[in-house]
């Protein structure tokens, strides 16, 4: 239990074996942008017993309402995206060989030679490339080019087709204090949001938005925010932790976030200047409860908040992320403690929300 600023104690929801198993199911599911059905099915299964209302909209967002107690509760949208980066088959070249396009932010340099799963039947394959034995000195000077790569499913070609999505075959694993798996961005947010619904604060109407197509332009969140019409929004995501040593042993000052540093609170990114009242509220909550936190270094990247805050007459918004290494690659690593502290901070911050927060001046 964590101490608040008063004499009362606060007992946050806990990350235990059940929550880790749920995260594993979600990470191991395939849900490349535009094909989020596998994750949507798990979300609906998990939230139905706790929802007052559920809607699956035309884009595939899952919008869940759990009402608080009282006549004029704040309507709080909490968002997490269901989709992941991946590939799509585009041209059948015969003999189980396919050209493909990237879906979302992936670099060709992380693709060569990777094990993959293709389509609804999760057909095993590999991303084939020209081996180093067959390259010349000039070719080795240049990074791997997308046009030189192919998806190879071999004899299983009759089970896949152009348009099928492709995900990395990177099973979820626990490594001591860490968790490793694909699509931590943003199955961590999805799992956290499910736990918030199961343990919803009574002082707010919790509007949970499990959104689609974030990785290709924040498309689902735009529609979800318009439909839910919240008083404010909080986005749950997982942000890159570039906390690795520098080549020359100098101090790494461009780390973005650090593993083990707690939840990352956004001040500014490419798409959003977070509402300063919500930033202060998160920081005040963390310090009152003794929850470690960090400020995500302002700069590139973004979350669904980039479109949410611009809907309707404007929606005060802020993002909180679990830091993770190697995002938008076949596998990521996160610290279990950062995930727990993120859940604690967000749940406590929601519990402490009052209408007076938004009545204060923005700056």
Image: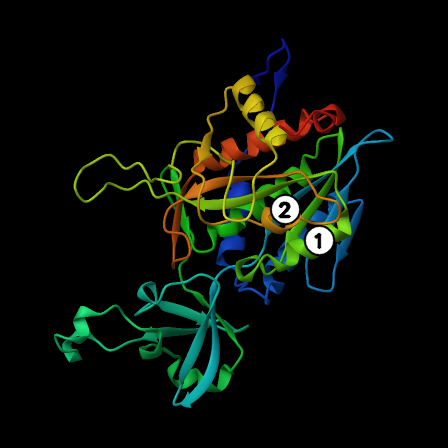
Real-space CA distance between mark 1 and mark 2, rounded to the nearest whole angstrom: 9 Å
In the image: residue 306, left or right of residue 240? right
Residue 299 image offset from top left, x and y in percent: 44, 44
Above or below residue 174? Residue 137 is below
For numbered disc 1, what is the local secondary structure? helix
Q: Looking at the image, which residue sits at the far top?
A: 7
For numbered disc 2, what is the local secondary structure? strand
Looking at the image, which residue is at 57% across and 30% down? 279
Q: Which residue is mark 2?
A: 79
Image quadrant where one finds the N terminus: top right
Residue 354 image offset from top left, x and y in percent: 73, 25
Name the foreground residue: 173 vs 64: 64
Q: Earlier in the sequence, mark 1 or mark 2?
A: 2
Image quadrant where one finds the C terminus: top right
- Visible residue check, residue 308: yes
For the residues bearing labels 1 and 2, Cβ distance under 8 angstroms: yes
Tell me if mark 2 has few (under 14), some (14-19) or many (20+) residues whose alpha carbon lies within 10 angstroms of its own.
Answer: many
Name the foreground residue: 30 vs 327: 327
Looking at the image, which residue is at 46% across and 26% down? 292
Looking at the image, which residue is at 51% across and 59% down? 84
Looking at the image, which residue is at 68% across and 53% down? 45
In the image: residue 204, left or right of residue 159? right
Q: Which mark is residue 224?
A: 1
Q: Quadrant of residue 345?
A: top right
Q: Looking at the image, which residue sits at the far bottom?
A: 94
């Amino acid at each position: 239990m964590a101490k608040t600023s008063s004499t009362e104690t606060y007992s946050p929801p806990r990350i235990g074996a059940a929550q880790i198993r749920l995260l594993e199911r979600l990470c191991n599911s395939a849900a490349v942008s535009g094909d989020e059905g596998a994750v949507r099915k798990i979300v609906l299964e998990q939230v139905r017993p706790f929802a007052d209302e559920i809607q699956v909209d035309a884009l595939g967002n899952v919008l869940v309402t759990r009402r608080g107690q009282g006549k004029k509760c704040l309507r709080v949208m909490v968002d997490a995206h269901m989709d992941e980066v991946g590939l799509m088959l585009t041209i059948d070249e015969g003999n189980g060989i396919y050209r493909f396009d990237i879906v979302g932010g992936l670099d060709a340099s992380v693709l060569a030679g990777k094990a993959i799963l293709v389509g609804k039947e999760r057909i095993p394959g590999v991303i084939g490339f020209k081996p180093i034995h067959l390259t010349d000195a000039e070719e080795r000077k240049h990074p791997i080019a997308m046009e030189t790569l192919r998806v190879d499913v071999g004899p299983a070609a009759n089970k896949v087709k152009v348009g099928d999505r492709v995900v990395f075959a990177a099973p979820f694993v626990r490594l001591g204090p860490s968790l490793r798996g694909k699509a931590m961005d943003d199955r961590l947010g999805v799992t956290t949001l499910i736990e918030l619904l199961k343990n919803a604060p009574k002082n707010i109407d919790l509007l949970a938005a499990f959104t689609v197509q974030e990785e290709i332009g924040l498309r689902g969140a735009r529609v979800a925010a318009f439909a839910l019409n919240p008083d404010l929004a909080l986005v749950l995501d997982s942000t890159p932790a570039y906390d690795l040593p520098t080549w020359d042993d100098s101090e790494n000052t461009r780390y973005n976030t650090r593993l083990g540093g707690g939840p990352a609170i956004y001040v500014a990114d490419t798409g959003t200047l977070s509402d300063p009242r919500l930033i202060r509220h998160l920081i005040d909550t963390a310090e009152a409860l003794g929850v470690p936190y960090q400020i995500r270094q302002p700069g590139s990247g973004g979350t669904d908040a980039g479109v949410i805050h611009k809907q309707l007459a404007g929606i005060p918004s802020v993002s909180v992320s679990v830091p993770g290494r190697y995002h938008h690659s076949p596998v990521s690593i996160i610290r279990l403690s950062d995930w727990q502290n993120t859940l604690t901070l967000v749940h406590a911050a929601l519990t402490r929300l009052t209408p007076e927060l938004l009545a204060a001046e923005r700056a």
